[in-house]
Amino acid sequence: MKNWLKEAEESLEEALIAIADGSIPPEHMYMLASVFYSKWQNTNNSELLEEMNEVTEEQVQHDWSCDEKSKYQYKFYFVSAYLYCFVVAGKVDELKHDQIMEYVCSQLDLFTEDYSS
């Protein structure tokens, strides 16, 4: 699990740097997940990346429809989307993804308390 934590932490750090200039709103940081997956996993399979984008978008939009303010939990959504790319790619199953997310969430500060930043 420590390897997954490192993977999540490093991808989050790079994503935060990528949005630091303000060109990408924080709540859209999850859209970078497949880009970083592609970069670090050395893949450029456009069909796979498109599927990752579609699945991620569907999951995030569903969550936001249930609680609009959840979009402010952008660190969580990025990490979840990034790690879910491994599910879409067939490298882990959904149960393993859930276990990884549970561990990562217990180790990293992915949630804002005031729910608006």
Image (spheres, rainbow, N blue to C red):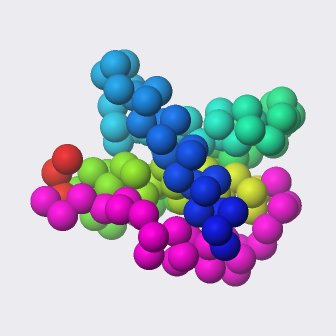
The mark total stands at: 0
On the question of residue 65 being in view, the answer is no
User: Is residue 56 shown above or below 29?
Assistant: below
**Extreme left residue here?**
114
Residue 83 at x, y percent in the picture: 64, 57
Asked if residue 108 lies in the magenta stretch, the reply is: yes
Q: Magenta segment: does it hold 20? A: no
Picture quadrant of residue 28: top left
Q: Residue at x 45, y 54 (%)?
A: 77
- Residue 48's place in the image compared with 81, above or below, is above
Percent coordinates x, y for residue 31 in the rendering: 53, 38
The answer to which quarter of the image holds residue 103 is: bottom right
The residue lying toward the viewer, choosing from 68 and 8, is 8
Rendered residue at 83%/35% (across/down) = 42
Question: Which residue does the image show at 16% across and 51% down from the upper left?
Answer: 116
- Front position in the image: 70 or 54: 70
* Nearest to the observer: residue 51 or residue 37: 37
Q: Which residue shows up at 33% across the image and 66% down it?
A: 66
Task: Using the rendered image of the protein, determine whether residue 92 is visible from the camera's viewpoint.
Answer: yes
Where is residue 94? Give x, y as percent: 70, 74
Magenta stretch, residue numbers: 89-114
Most foreground residue, 103 or 32: 103
Relative to 61, 59 lies left or right = right
The reply, left or right, for residue 56 in relation to residue 62 is right
* Quarter of the figure that contains the N terminus: bottom right
